[in-house]
Image: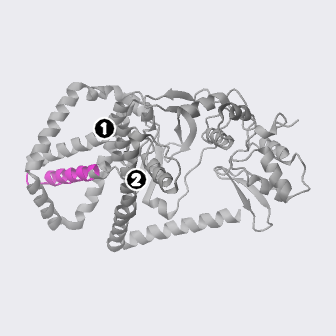
Amino acid sequence: MTVLDQNPNSHLCPDLRDYWQLVQRKEDKQRLLKSTSTPHEITLSAEEDYALRHFTGQFNVTQIQKRCQQKYPNISPTFIEKLCDRLLTEGILTENIAQPYITLKPEAEWIEHPAGYWLLRNPKGTPKWGLIQKKIPNLVYLFFNQYSYETIQLLEQFPLETVVDRCNYPSQQLQQQRQILAATGMLAGIDPPAKKGFSLNPLQLLYLQIPLFDPDTFLSLYGDRLSWLWTKMAGFCLALFLTSCAIVGWNQRLEIAYTGAKLWESYSNSLILPFIFLSLFVVVIHELGHAFTLKHFGGIVPEIGLLLMMLFPAAYTNTTDSYRLPRWQRLLVVGAGLLVQLTIAAIALTIWNFAIPGSALQITSYLLLIAALFTLAVNLNPLAKFDGYYFLVALTGILNLRSRARAFYFNLFTGKPLQEPQNTRWILAIYGPLSLLYLWFIFGFLILRILQWFWVNLPQISQSILLIALIYWLFSKLFSSSR
């Protein structure tokens, strides 16, 4: 008796494409199913290869069986059932995927958010591979509306067909929902393999995140010592200090601009490297501001990493756990980084005013002031996915603001029903075209200008990076096709 004998129609064949790929060896034309993260591979017949091309999370056993019989009329009527048994034996499938019910992992928890949606949170997701720490915990979040939450509750108790009949919910959407739960490691007994390292193509050099380590233990150790930073008295003192420095800075704006022009005239390109290092310092402290604030509110910070943005080094912090917080606390988590940058700028301005004119301390404090203000201006932009964007998301309560704005206009122009609530449509209507114009023109212009500067001023480095990226890309393609 196979694991599918109970009711084949209710068994969704999972999407294997994230972790397995179908390839063909050049030397003997043998078809293979190969793991994308381990050396594991199995040989396939032509019929099995064709069947596995339909393991996309959209078809059940009976549907794939019918398609295979249309192409190969002589195959066994239980061909797909036996193929699933083979995949189960090889460790490619788990028995839970073949069950008509779903079972969430014990550590997966439902959180009802005050904003009106449900979060499914798993603090022990499939680990990531980092450069410093070999395995980094992966905090996984899924967002559901009330109706989807209720249907998942029913899927834990009844087969898919019963839920479809009871809820009048489209079968394909339920299958996709169940597959998402499996692919994200939310279902008991299903653990997608951790992806070792990362693949690279030239376009990723424009925005590349490289995980480094899990900072949660460090934050827990020092978080209590810094708890005074979130008191009302500390907030009052900080507001007074920043306001005073803002007034001083505004009155000195012409002197600050003149100093910058004189420094550039005296030192020119030799200021670029110190400015980059000071900007990186500001960004690192900025990210720690996010991390410590989230930790202060009881969140988990599973990951800190290196960010290469248009070849410019920076840092990032995984603050996904802030989604479980009330709106005002999420605003504080996002705003903490911006407050850190303002504080650094204010301290740098104070030092610059009291330092000896022309001294190394005054020049350094001036560069730190400009680095803090420059990175602050970049982060405040709500049209790119920096702090300004996430601050706007927290302020409006509209999750996935950019993608929902695009979907809003797509439905509007194609005549499909507008699914957004009336009170959010005006925000989406304004944000959609502005973000699109930004990405097409401003961001593209900046990329071209930065690449042009690197090509003119640092031609050897630019050519070397481009050559390395192209060689890596070509070899990865040749290697994958030869397997």
Q: Quadrant of the C terminus?
A: bottom right
Residue drawn at (15%, 51%) of the image: 361
- Write down the region rendered in magenta: 356-376
- Residue 73 in which image quadrant: bottom right
From the viewer's perspective, is 210 left or right of 342? right
For residue 132: magenta? Answer: no
**Residue flagged by tag 1: what amino acid is it?**
Ala
Disc number placed over residue 336 in the picture, else none = 1
Q: Is residue 323 above or below residue 386?
A: above
Disc number placed over residue 432 in the picture, else none = 2
From the viewer's perspective, is 341 left or right of 459? left
Q: Residue 18 placed where, x, y %? A: 63, 50
Per the image, label 2 sits on a secondary structure element best described as helix
Badge 2, how many Cα within 10 Å: few under 14, some, many 20+? Answer: many
Q: Residue 310 placed where, x, y %? A: 39, 60
Kindly tell me whether residue 40 is visible in this rendering: yes
Q: Is residue 310 above or below residue 59?
A: below
**Residue flagged by tag 2: what amino acid is it?**
Gly
Main secondary-structure element of the magenta-colored stretch:
helix
